[in-house]
Image (tube, rainbow, N blue to C red):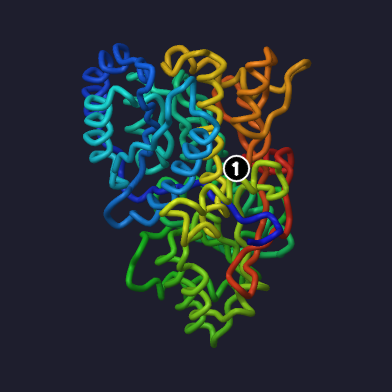
Amino acid sequence: METASRATHRLRIKRTPYATVALIAAAGLVLAACGSSSTPGSSSHSTVDIADIAPLTGSLAQLGLFTEGPCEGAVNVVNSAGGVLGHKLACSPVDDLGDPADAVANVSKALATNSSIAGAVGITSNTAATEVPILNTAKITMVSQNGLSLYTKTSDQYFWRMTPPDLLGGAGMGLAAASYKSVAAIFQNDVGDTGNQPGVVAALHSKGVALTTNVTIAGDQASYESTVSQIIHTHPQALIISADQQTTDTLLSEYSSLNNGSVPPVVVPTDILSPGLFTSMKKLLGTTYLTTKLDLVGTYVNESTPEFKTYYNAVRATPAGAHEAEQIVATQAIGTIYDGIMVMALAMEAAHSTKPSVYNSYMTKVTMSRPGAVEVHSFAQGVHELKAGHQIYYVGVTGPVVFNKYHNSTGEFASFAFTPSGAVRTITVFPPAEVAAAAP
């Protein structure tokens, strides 16, 4: 395991259009009664379910797999400390296939058939716009890993987010390229990558970097030869590419073949991280390029925090995390799944209830730093202090949780580089104020 902090991303799974408002409204009407009548954990030995809503099958299943380790790891940690108010927690997988329309049907069915669901995690960007209204109407507390700017100022009472919006992600990418005089920027035409675009443009402008190309392309095409040729003729010192792995691989491969084997330094979002990324890019560009000319930019997780070792070991001990812990713990959004479950569990303890309509307001009460409150770094420590009559605030693997009035808490951004072994190391940490100042 790397001793330096790892690269992070926000699970921005965004590849299909939103489902219709009519579908959302219909599902919300059906679930309103379901959400208000259920009381998870009402019997003395019942199980309290946390819905893990993600693409668990289909073309995006690898990303769904990333959510399983921290969800299962978190509930195992809580259960080993005695559970919540005497109840065991469990992860309840809900497969949304990464598709907004499928998400409406599958999330609605899960809530209608399982009255033990008391919280939810996952809810990624590709499906958040359809899932959040359903969960909010059903009064299910959720910690979402989406990056949509739509939820930067939301009135959804049961929505919580510990990951920053894409706008700030783009600004972080622009700051990572601020040392170059000219940059060409390429964005895939999905809601996540185009969400980065305004932040990239604004940050480059604020730093006086010339933007030679600002182009949006369709994803996963067989060739981008025409686009790449045009970019090469502008002679950029660096590239910013915000796209999925397949699109990024094709762009860089064609850039190399059309430019006599030469590819300028490139900045990509840590959203692209996957177990096969290093191997794939190594074949295309070589180890030296990956370790010296590729910057990954995303939100920052500090491995020196007290809870990190527990988190890492908990993820590694799960079936999903056993072989992919190195990549899983490298992602900030994944860390917020773990932290989100810890915060929900502590809120339940503080509220003396597993019912979301009761404990939801306690999400800030167990995370807000204030005079007299005790800083805690684990569920067990938090429960101990609560039973002693103390107020608490949880600081987890993603650092302090500072929810604003819109239930958003953002972290720091950083740039990262691959090591020769394929792990990642931190290069530069960008303070939140610097990122905010560079954003539009």
Q: Where does the C terminus fall, quadrant-wise?
A: top right
Which residue is nearer to you in this view: 20 or 324? 324
Image position, residue 125 (x, y; %): 42, 41
Marker count (numbered): 1
Q: Where does the N terminus fall, quadrant-wise?
A: bottom right
Image point (30%, 44%), residue name: 17
Q: Residue furthest bottom?
A: 260
Q: Residue furthest right?
A: 371
Image point (49%, 40%), residue name: 147
Residue type at tag 1: Leu
Residue 50: quadrant of the picture: top left
| Residue 113 appears left or right of 121 | left
Can residue 214 be seen at all in this image of the molecule? Answer: no
The answer to whether 357 is drawn above or below residue 409 in the figure is above
| Residue 127 appears left or right of 210 | left
Q: Which residue corresponds to mark 1? A: 168
Which residue is nearer to you in this view: 230 or 374? 374
Can residue 46 be seen at all in this image of the molecule? Answer: yes
| Residue 228 appears left or right of 288 | left
Image point (23%, 40%), residue name: 102
| Residue 104 appears left or right of 124 | left
The answer to whether 327 is drawn above or below residue 9 in the figure is below
Image position, residue 14 (x, y; %): 39, 48
Image position, residue 330 (x, y; %): 57, 54
Image position, residue 24 (x, y; %): 27, 27
- Local SS, label 1: helix
Image point (45%, 78%), residue name: 254
For label 1, count other residues whose C-alpha is less than 10 Å away and answer few (under 14), some (14-19) or many (20+). Answer: many
The answer to whether 12 is drawn above or below residue 244 in the figure is above
